[in-house]
Image (cartoon, rainbow, N blue to C red):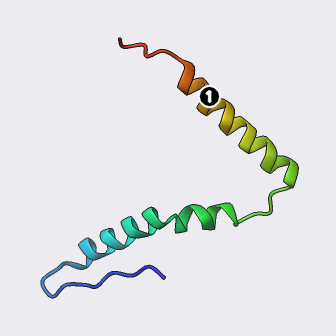
C-alpha cells in the first residue's frame, strides 16, 4: 500500500501532491483504469498489437527536426 508521511510543517496540498506522485509511479491509477471495465481477449490483443505498431513506427521514423 502506498503512503506518505506528512511532515510537521508541510501543507496538506503538498503532501497530497506527493501521494498522487507516488501512486502514479507505482502504477496504481493505471491499474484501476485498466480493470474498470471487462476487456475481451480479442480487444486486449488488438490494443497490444496497435501499441506495438505505434512503438515500432516511432522507433523507425526519422526525427523531423534534424
Figure quadrant of residue 15? bottom left
Q: Is residue 44 above or below residue 2?
A: above
List x then y, in percent, for residue 12: 25, 79
Figure quadrant of residue 58? top right
In the picture as drawn, the residue positioned furthest to the bottom comes out as: 8
Q: Is residue 20 left or right of residue 8?
A: right
Q: Residue at x 45, y 63 (%)?
A: 24
Q: Residue at x 56, y 20 (%)?
A: 60
List x then y, in percent, for residue 19: 36, 73
List x then y, in percent, for residue 46: 79, 41
Q: Is residue 53 left or right of residue 65?
A: right
Q: Secondary structure at mark 1?
A: helix
| Camera-nearest residue between 14 and 56 | 56
Q: Residue at x 75, y 63 (%)?
A: 37
Q: Badge 1 local density, few (<14 within 10 Å), some, or many (20+)?
A: few
List x then y, in percent, for residue 62: 48, 15
Q: Residue at x 80, y 57 (%)?
A: 39
Residue at the spot of label 1 = 56
| Camera-nearest residue between 8 and 51 | 51
Image quadrant containing the C terminus: top left
Q: Is residue 14 left or right of residue 25?
A: left
In the picture as drawn, the residue positioned furthest to the left comes out as: 9
Q: Number of marks in the image? A: 1
Amino acid at each position: 500500500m502506498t503512503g506518505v508521511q506528512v511532515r510537521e510543517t508541510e501543507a496538506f496540498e503538498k503532501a497530497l501532491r506527493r501521494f498522487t506522485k507516488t501512486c502514479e509511479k507505482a502504477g496504481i491509477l493505471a491499474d484501476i483504469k485498466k480493470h474498470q471495465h471487462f476487456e475481451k481477449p480479442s480487444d486486449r490483443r488488438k490494443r497490444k498489437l496497435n501499441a506495438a505498431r505505434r512503438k515500432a513506427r516511432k522507433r523507425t521514423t526519422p526525427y523531423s527536426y534534424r
